[in-house]
Image (cartoon, rainbow, N blue to C red):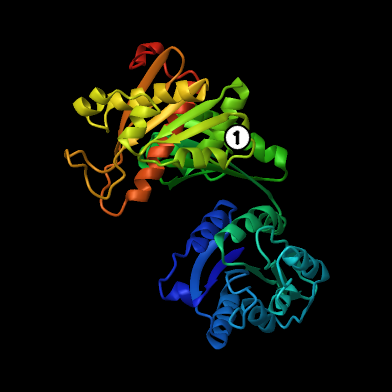
Amino acid sequence: MKCEILSVGTELLLGDILNTDAQFLARELAAMGFTMQHQGTVGDNPERLREAVEHALSRSDIIITSGGLGPTADDITKEICAEVMGIPLVLHEESLQRMLDFFSHRKGGMPETNRKQAYLPEGGVVFRNDHGTAPGCAMEKDGKCIICLPGPPRELYPMFNNFVKPYLSEKSGMVIISHNVRTFGIGESLMAETAGELLDMENPTVAPYAKDGEALLRVTARAENKEKAEELIKPVIAEIEKRLGKFIYGIDVSSIQEKVVELLKEKKMKIGLAESCTAGYIAKRITEVPGSSEVFDCGIVSYANRIKEQILGVPHDAIEKNGVVSREVACHMAKGALRVSGADIAVSVTGIAGPDPSEGGKPAGLSYIALADKQHVWCIRFETGRSGDNREYNRYVTASNALNLTRLYLTGKLTAEEAEHDFD
């Protein structure tokens, strides 16, 4: 079946925001085996939107729109699509009640303007919104289908994965299963090169994706039922694991911090942190994971040298001799965090987030990351190679490398021979 994506929003046309919805939907639909021939973007204008919908319907079987489901007068996507399809909108009581419940804890209750979001295509399929007030919907007529989704990615992504994907799977007459093989420490291009001919397969398909500092391979199979799809996928994932080995940190985990928390729980261990350039970023990401309180003892943000010395016990001479961004200081910070926290392991980071290099000429993006247990201390030198306006990128990716060092330790991939020195 031919699919088409229609993104709605004047802010998209003007370039005020990046259209990540279209990228996400295109990848998901391609992985499901739908033919994608057109994408379009249109502003919040009734006439132009009507024209775009009519044109899309003339050449595609399924139209997926994103945006324009809000409560204000310029949110017109659902209304225009229903008008073009000749389907009336009717009050959906369940959606209305969910909105009333959503606003029940807010002063003044639900604004009357939000009520329009509860009017949905008669006889259509409603997709629950677990992260906002605007439900999505699907309307069908004369062999054509329009699916309307909210614009905010935090609402669209889970709605698509949880509700729209199963709906579309039924239309394809096949069960579609995907598994994500997540990697760290290998770039997308090298990962794809290592995967080699696996990327040319048709069923299952293997597709590479990248995000800041890491990459993944999505393996997707189509079959008559879930069991057969899983049978197709299993040997492919086994081959990927054979080729990528230690770079793989998990299958179908959402993030590297989720994997670290999982491993800490399995081993009944706790972690302490000492962060300088990342300023609590590692602690933030660990505590994003539910249940992290079982494994996270404390985090010390030691920006000032005085704090490094007084709280973490970093010798003043070590800073004077080597500089604050150095292997020696990182090791002392990790040992200090271990002593202060009483945890089983501690991780430290000292570096230069940017945008400018240090006074000593050390580049932005350089960091030293250390991990200490009660016997040894390990340390790695890491450099992002980015300066200028990449401060946030540097901090995020440095935190990711600290989490990955922790993962390597917890999975037994850091040996005593590789340690910087013994703990004293």
What quarter of the picture does the N terminus occupy?
Answer: bottom right
**Residue under the image location 76 percent in, 65 percent down:** 104
Instruction: Say which residue appears at 43% left-offset and 12% top-offset.
Output: 375
| Residue 230 visible in image | yes
Three-letter amino acid code of the residue under disc 1: Ser
Residue extending furthest toward the right: 93
Foreground pick, 322 / 69: 322
Q: Quadrant of the C terminus?
A: top left
- Where is residue 385 shown, x and y percent of the image? 26, 42
Task: Give coordinates of residue 259: x percent, y percent.
Answer: 55, 33
Q: Is residue 196 visible?
A: no
Look at 71% across and 58% down and name the residue there: 167
Q: Is residue 16 above or below residue 339?
A: below
**Residue placed under numbered mark 1 in the picture:** 292
The answer to which image quadrant residue 70 occupies is: bottom right
Q: What x and y, as percent, mark residue 366?
A: 28, 37
Whether residue 421 sits left or right of residue 45 in the image: it is: left
* Count of marks, rendered view: 1
Q: Residues within 10 Å of mark 1 (few under 14, many from 20)?
A: many
Q: Is residue 24 left or right of residue 116?
A: left
- Residue 231 lies, in percent from the top left, at 65, 34
191 or 137: nearer the viewer: 137
Residue 249 in the figure: left or right of residue 98: left
Instruction: Name above or below for residue 54 compared with residue 92.
Output: below
Image-quadrant location for residue 72: bottom right
Residue at disc 1, secondary structure = helix
Which residue occupies the foreground of this view, 106 or 29?
Answer: 106
Residue 92 is left or right of residue 78, and the answer is right
**From what the image shows, is residue 89 above or below residue 259?**
below
